[in-house]
Amino acid sequence: MFYKILILISCCSYFILPIKVFGLEPTSGIVCYSLNEKQKTEFLFKRNNDNIFAKAFKRINGNFIEVGNVVGRKTSSFILFEDNSVNKNLDFAWHLDEVTKNLKPYILSKKNNELIILPDEQSCISKNFWY
C-alpha cells in the first residue's frame, strides 16, 4: 500500500511540478607546457553559430580571458589563433599543429622596429573544460 501511494505522489509531482534540467557541454581547449620554463598555459576555443571555432581564450590568473580570434584553421591539420596578451606592440598568433599538438609562435605583423622576444614553442594535450 505504501508503494502505491509513493508511486501516485511521484506521478502527480511529475505533472504538477515540472523541473527543467539544463546540461552544459564541455568547451574544447588545450593545455600546453613549455619544456624550457616548466610552465603551463591553457587555451580554450569557443564556437560561433556556424559551429566553427571563432574566439580564443587564455587562462590568466585563474580565469579564461578572451585574447583574440581564430584567424585560420584547416580541420584536423592546424589552428592559427591570436594572442593579444603576449606583447601590445605585436600582432601575435599561435600556430597549433593538431596532429603533433605542437604550439609555435607566429608573428602576424609588427607595429615598430623594436626587438621582440617570442615565447618558446610548447607541447600540448587536448582537454575539455567544464565551466
Image (cartoon, rainbow, N blue to C red):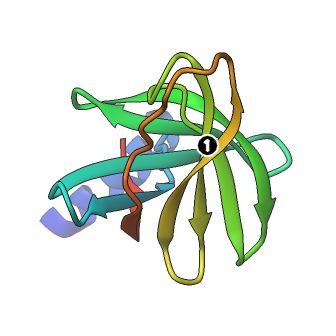
Is 20 rendered above or below residue 129?
above
Q: Residue at x 77, y 72 (%)?
A: 75
Which residue: 58% across, 63% down?
96
The residue carrying mark 1 is: 93
Amino acid beneath label 1: Ala
Helix, strand or loop under label 1: strand
Q: Position of residue 51 (x, y in %)?
A: 78, 52
**In the rendered view, would you say 116 is above or below 118?**
above
Name the quarter where the N terminus is drawn.
Answer: bottom left
| Residue at figure coordinates x 42%, y 54% from the top left | 11
Residue 20 visible in the picture? yes
Q: Nearer the viewer, residue 15 or 45?
A: 45
Is residue 60 toward the left or the right of residue 58 in the image? left
Q: Is residue 84 left or right of residue 50?
A: left
Q: Residue at x 24, y 57 (%)?
A: 5
> Quarter holding the C terminus?
top left
Numbered label tally: 1
